[in-house]
Amino acid sequence: MSARILDGKAIAARIRARLAERVATLSFRPGLRVVRVGEDPASGVYVRNKDKAATAAGFDSATIHLPAETSEAELLATIARLNADPAVDGILVQLPLPPQIRTEAAIAAVDPAKDVDGFHPLNAGRLAAGQPGLVPCTPRGVMHILAESGVALRGARAVVLGRSQIVGRPMAQLLLGADCTVTIAHSRTKDLAAECRRAEVLVAAVGRPGMVRGDWIAPGAVVIDVGINRLPDGRLVGDVAFAEAAAVAGAITPVPGGVGPMTIACLLENTLDAALARRG
Ligand code: GUN
């Protein structure tokens, strides 16, 4: 193995510690509310981790857990109540939602000023227009890893593998904003391997275990693995075949311990940003 390992867990811990110091200086506690609907087991783990990290950093955090049979109208009423609550700075509706609720309706119902997921079309539009706004947590976390690791982005060829609203698209916008030359590749791209081999910075966010092989990676490239995939044997792996990739890449994020921990740190960062913007 030759690649430098980019330790997201350590970077996230530093960010959380810095946030806790800033929150301690405020005259109020930034308020975060996570809304969970139903019993998706992975969501249960995520929501508990968010709540623990927020409380540890001094935020006023609570989870609102609604039953699986909650109607769309009931969820929208809950969101409306949180929008109107002055103690609430950030609202996160945990995905996935049960089938009777339209995800887009829930996302659009959140006050854009409290949209700490950065999923509201207004915030997505601001990001695409290069205007300030709340940015999705995982791509924001990737930008922190790149910055803290000293990766030079200006003029670099970046390839984002995946075009989701949550990661791929906002990731591409942030890299473009950092003056990369950005390609978005996806499941319909002709010769994905060849596109990836052109990347000096490769961000994989497709949700397919080990899809990116060692020979897809240019020697010395920086590889950011956003994938978190649970194998049948219980192991957690990324979208990149780690051992093969680490033999070729210049730097690479591990799974677990790479991008994953950054997402929660950036959720707290977004919540503090939203609180300061709202309360001055
Ligand atoms: N489910 C999986 N990832 C996320 C996320 O980043 N935000 C929300 N709201 N739900 C998720």
Image: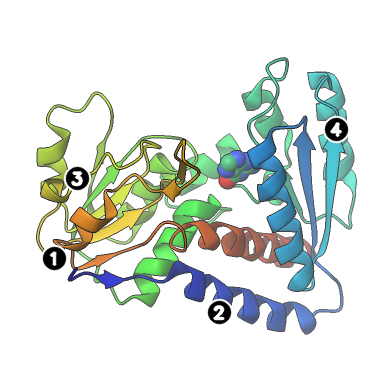
Label 4 CB-ligand 1 distance < 8 A: no
Residue 93 visible in the displayed image: no
Eye-nearest disc, 3 or 2: 3
Q: CA distance from mark 1 to mark 2?
A: 27 Å
- Residue with the most extreme front position: 233
The image quarter containing residue 96 is top right
Which type of secondary structure does the marked residue at label 2 adopt?
helix
Looking at the picture, which amino acid does disc 3 mark?
A: Arg
Q: Which callout, 1 or 4, points at the residue further toward the start of the chain?
A: 4
Label 3 CB-ligand 1 distance < 8 A: no
Q: Which mark is residue 66?
A: 4
- Which class describes the residues within 10 Å of circle 2: few (<14), some (14-19), or many (20+)? few
Quarter of the rendering occupied by the C terminus: bottom right
47 sits left or right of 220 in the view: right
What residue is shown with label 1? 220
Q: Which callout, 1 or 3, points at the residue further toward the start of the chain?
A: 3
Q: Which callout, 3 or 2, points at the residue further toward the start of the chain?
A: 2
Q: Which callout, 2 or 4, points at the residue further toward the start of the chain?
A: 2
What residue is shown with label 3? 213
